[in-house]
């Protein structure tokens, strides 16, 4: 059994976690969580629907009234203990990620480090929430701005980073004094449940952090977006779903954070360090088998270096080891499911029909199932679907450009604006291009940009708000203004 792969089998939970209790059955039956590497059933979990979501929200509201009054230093100590437990159980948590999501174990370990960093960071930020005293227009008045926790928060999280996308939301929420109900992706609930168990052990009070399981996402989502006691929705996922959640949340005017789809351009200028560029492109494209919202979706290479880089990228891509993420040395795991593979295949067919050339890969892997060969295709144009739609798979499209102005226009020709990357050794060009790119984040001479100290988020149809950094906790706070009169002058 997969449970036997854990050092601490009690982290293998088989129920939802609501108001500090494990709920192992509901009236709605169970559903199967499968390993994408082999299709085998990992566990059957209870399906939560409206009743469970209602109870979770009501419990979270009751817990909020107490948790919000806990001194910041005490909240910080509890979240710090949660951080320490995550670090101590890193290997088990990484194993869970690989089993249910498929990414190589080395990457899963990296995700746990990343996830833990948000708990550590926001535990520290809990003690730094402060307001302001503003000069008043009258000498008898004092104007004060307070920052207060917003209330019950609902988090809807994706399958591609099942630990980090929870702690990046729960860390600041709990630090601010809010409570949170999490609905993780139905494909990857085991990591969320293990995090809930560690939160319980750390001393997070009942109701402050709950996790709903199940594949009835619409039923639970409708409660979370429509419930009057939920004051904040935070979502990471597709733009299409984000639009629906925003519309549903409008009825009760909820504060919303949306980290949505991307179509990240990666620009390599002639003057770039080619070795640095190759490594950066591989990191930006193939991390998590290309299943990342900030993955390089369009690789623009300037004329003078295009052919050289295309050849080098193809050769390096052919060397990548594909397999079950638990096997040593694996760099590319399976895609999440058959539908994801079919989408990649359709995009590739469209590109080849339009004149693109396959330089490496280009078909399902010999391992079968959800495995797809890491692929490089050249001579891609902006008219092809692979350059218009987010791929979310291990296919790297290469586009040629001539001038700086041309590539900026090409890169910005999209409704999305999450991340971008550029490679150059010309400081002035870097400044000009970074400022001109219509994205919320820009990686310069690097393909790895995520950090707990930096504000993560996009513009245009890639989202609203920021996660991480000292800006991230503001998403879970309200500002209250006090106008105090009657302070008689001496």
Image (cartoon, helix red, strand yellow):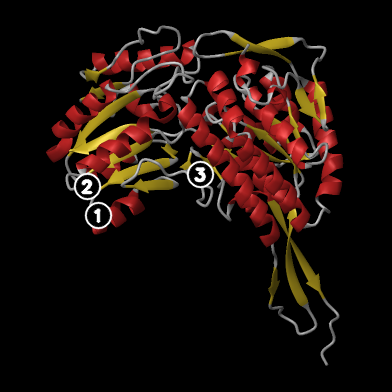
Is residue 39 or residue 136 the one in the foreground? 39
Measuring 37% from the left and 42% from the top, which residue is drawn there? 420
In screen coordinates, is 7 left or right of 480? left
Q: Mark 3 and mark 2 in contact (Cβ < 8 Å)?
A: no
**Above or below: residue 482 compared with residue 435:** below
Mark number, residue 116: none
Please indicate whether residue 322 sits to the left or right of residue 473 in the image: left
- The numbered dot on residue 457 is 3
Q: Is residue 25 visible?
A: yes
Q: Residue 25 location, x and y as percent? A: 80, 15
Q: CA distance from mark 2 to mark 3?
A: 25 Å
Residue 172, placed above or below residue 309? below
- 320 or 213: nearer the viewer: 320
Q: Mark 1 or 3 closer to N-term?
A: 1
Q: Earlier in the sequence, mark 1 or mark 2?
A: 2
Residue 338 locus on image (x, y percent) = 48, 11
Residue 146: which quarter of the image? bottom right
In contact (CB < 8 Å): disc 1 and disc 2: yes
**Mark closest to the chain's N terminus, 2 or 3:** 2
**Crowding at mark 2 (Cα within 10 Å: few <14, some 14-19, many 20+):** some
Q: Position of residue 158 (x, y in %)?
A: 57, 28
Q: Residue at x 34, y 37 (%)?
A: 265
Whole-angstrom CA distance, mark 1 to mark 3, is 24 Å
Residue neighbourhood size for the residue with mark 3, other residues' Cα within 10 Å, grouped as few (<14), some (14–19), many (≥20)? many
Q: Secondary structure at mark 2?
A: helix
What residue is rendered at 52% in x and 33% in y? 109
Q: Which residue is mark 2?
A: 404
Which of the two marks, 2 or 3, is nearer to us in this view? 3
Q: Which residue is mark 1?
A: 429
Q: Position of residue 159 (x, y in %)?
A: 56, 25
């Amino acid at each position: 059994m997969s449970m036997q792969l854990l050092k601490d089998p009690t982290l293998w939970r088989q129920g939802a976690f609501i108001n500090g209790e494990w709920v192992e059955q509901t009236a709605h039956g169970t559903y199967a969580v499968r390993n994408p590497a082999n299709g085998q059933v990992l566990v059957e979990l209870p399906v939560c629907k409206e009743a469970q979501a209602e109870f979770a929200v009501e419990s979270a509201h009751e817990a909020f009234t107490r948790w919000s009054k806990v001194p910041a230093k005490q909240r910080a100590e509890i979240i710090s203990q949660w951080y320490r437990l995550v670090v101590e159980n890193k290997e088990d948590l990484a194993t869970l990620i690989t089993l249910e999501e498929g990414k190589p174990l080395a990457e899963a370990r990296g995700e746990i480090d990343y996830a833990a960093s948000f708990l550590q960071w926001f535990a520290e930020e809990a003690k730094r929430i402060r307001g302001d005293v503003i000069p008043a227009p009258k000498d008898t008045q004092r104007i004060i701005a307070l920052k207060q926790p917003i209330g019950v928060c609902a988090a809807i999280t994706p399958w591609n980073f099942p630990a980090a996308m929870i702690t990046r939301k729960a860390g600041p929420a709990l630090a601010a004094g809010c409570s949170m109900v999490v609905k993780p992706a139905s494909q990857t609930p085991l990591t969320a449940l293990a995090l809930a168990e560690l939160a319980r052990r750390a001393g997070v009070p009942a109701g402050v952090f709950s996790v709903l399981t199940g594949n009835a996402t619409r039923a639970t989502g409708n409660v979370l977006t429509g419930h009057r006691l939920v004051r904040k929705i935070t979502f990471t996922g597709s733009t299409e779903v984000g639009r629906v959640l925003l519309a549903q949340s409008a009825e009760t005017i909820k504060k919303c954070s949306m980290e949505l789809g991307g179509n990240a351009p990666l620009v390599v200028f002639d003057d770039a360090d080619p070795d640095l560029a190759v490594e950066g492109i591989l990191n930006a494209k193939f991390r998590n088998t290309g299943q990342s919202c900030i993955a390089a979706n369009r690789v623009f290479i300037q004329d003078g270096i295009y052919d050289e880089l295309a050849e080098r990228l193809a050769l390096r891509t052919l060397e990548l080891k594909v397999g079950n993420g638990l096997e040593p040395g694996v760099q590319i795991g399976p895609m999440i499911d058959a539908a994801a593979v079919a989408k990649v295949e359709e995009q590739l067919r469209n590109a080849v029909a339009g004149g693109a050339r396959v330089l490496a890969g280009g078909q399902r892997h010999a391992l079968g199932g959800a495995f797809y060969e890491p692929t490089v295709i050249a001579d891609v144009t902006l008219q092809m679907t692979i350059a218009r739609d987010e791929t979310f798979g291990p296919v790297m499209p290469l586009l040629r450009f001539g001038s700086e102005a041309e590539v900026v226009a090409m890169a910005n020709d999209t409704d999305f604006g999450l991340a971008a990357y550029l490679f150059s050794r010309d400081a002035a060009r870097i400044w000009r291009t970074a400022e001109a790119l219509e994205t919320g984040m820009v990686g310069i001479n690097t393909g790895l940009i995520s950090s707990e100290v930096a504000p993560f988020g996009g513009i245009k149809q890639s989202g609203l708000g920021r996660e991480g950094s000292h800006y991230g906790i503001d998403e879970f706070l309200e500002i209250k203004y006090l106008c105090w009169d009657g302070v008689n002058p001496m």
